[in-house]
Image: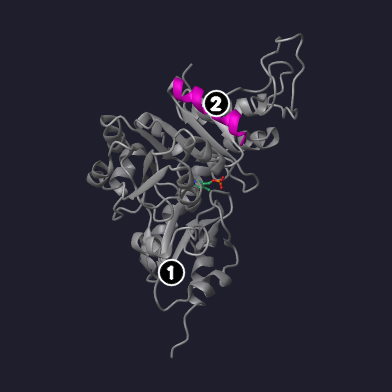
Amino acid sequence: MSLKIDSVLIHGGIDGDETTGAVSVPVYQTSTYKQDGLGQTRGWEYSRTGNPTRAALEKLIADLEQGEYGLAFASGLAAINTVLSLFKAGDKLVVSDNIYGGTFRILDNVFKNFGITYKIVDTSDLDKVREAIDEDVKAIYVESPANPLLTVTDIKAISEISHEFGKLLIVDNTFLTPYLQRPLTLGADIVIHSGTKYLGGHSDTISGLVVVNDKKLAERLYYLQNAIGGVLAPWDSFLVIRGIKTLGVRMERHVNNARRIAKWLAESGYVSRVYYPGLENDPGFKVQKKQADGPGAMLSFVLNEEYDYRRFFKNLKLITLAESLGGVESLVCHPASMTHAAIPADIRKEVGIVDELIRFSVGIEDADDLIADLKQAIENSKKAVM
Ligand SMILES: *Cc1c(COP(=O)(O)O)cnc(C)c1O
């Protein structure tokens, strides 16, 4: 029976426990497994290599992304580390110009030391992507919508370019989740998630996920997952499975709240710019609408000059100043000094990550309460008139 995504969220992957009938997948808190004789395992050998709770999550994320093979890691960056380990010295990656700061950091300060280089390109501009491809380029790495300016990249168009040149397309789908966007169906080769965000959804665990369709690619990634060892623990696998069950209802509410707040901000007179692909005048609106089932609930805005962003952060009462996103609670952050501090100031400025930029992960609280909190925090942050 082919199930719709709301049912896959709850019954996808491995549904419950065959042996006992438990409706939740048990936490197999074990490091190793008894072998019945030399070379006679029951399918499990050692929990770095494979664990039933992790396997249930791996199958679930593959089902949700409409892919074949899923892998779970100890963090989004452990997932990214493993994917980047597919490459070797001399290889080059074309990378979106606004990506998660930690992704930039691992490229710039870890993989570059191993001779794997990168070229930053505005991947929303297809001509620029085409121009950036040369023989050394082995993959294109995009986030859409990207962090923190919510720039939308046309995944299908990029996948056509990458396949024309025989390159891999890697998409970080953290911001929309498979509930709203399924990059493999748009032609991506590898989908990456920080499960820490919407998939887990409750700001209580760190995790990363990868999904692919190609068997050879999957075999190499499973090999690297075991060889590198950044695997997700059984308990955290359980928490992410549990989070995913409510992803649908959470995302509906997240998106409704974000739409209302983006509209309110844009009309408020308090801000000079709102970045949100759900607004009709946003440059990413059309492509986003074509390739995803919703614009997500991440938005960024630039406060008008008369307001002091430091005071704004201090004034917030309901909304929390913190790193991370995608949890049930609303969080704001200051990309220039927090999530994107790893990006050099000149590159930050060039791509538009100005000091006045505020990123908002809209939670599922009451939208009126969130708007009231924003309003009082902004009004009380007016700079003193000289
Ligand atoms: C948080 C995040 C990551 C990194 O994930 P961790 O779980 O923090 O390691 C990667 N990509 C995006 C888009 C993120 O938001």
Q: Give the number of the mark in front: 2 or 1.
A: 2
Q: Are marks 2 and 1 in contact (CB under 8 Å)?
A: no
Magenta residues, start to end: 216-230
- Is 228 colored magenta in this rendering? yes
Closer to the camera in the image, 169 or 226: 226
Circle number at residue 356: 1
Residue 80 seen anywhere in this rendered image of the structure: yes
Q: Position of residue 176 (x, y in %)?
A: 45, 42
Q: Position of residue 131 (x, y in %)?
A: 23, 44
Disc 1 residue type?
A: Glu
Is disc 2 surrounded by few (<14), some (14 to 19) or many (20+) residues within 10 Å?
A: some
Closer to the camera in the image, 110 or 174: 110
Closer to the camera in the image, 345 or 56: 345
Circle number at residue 222: 2
Is disc 1 surrounded by few (<14), some (14 to 19) or many (20+) residues within 10 Å?
A: some
Disc 2 residue type?
A: Tyr
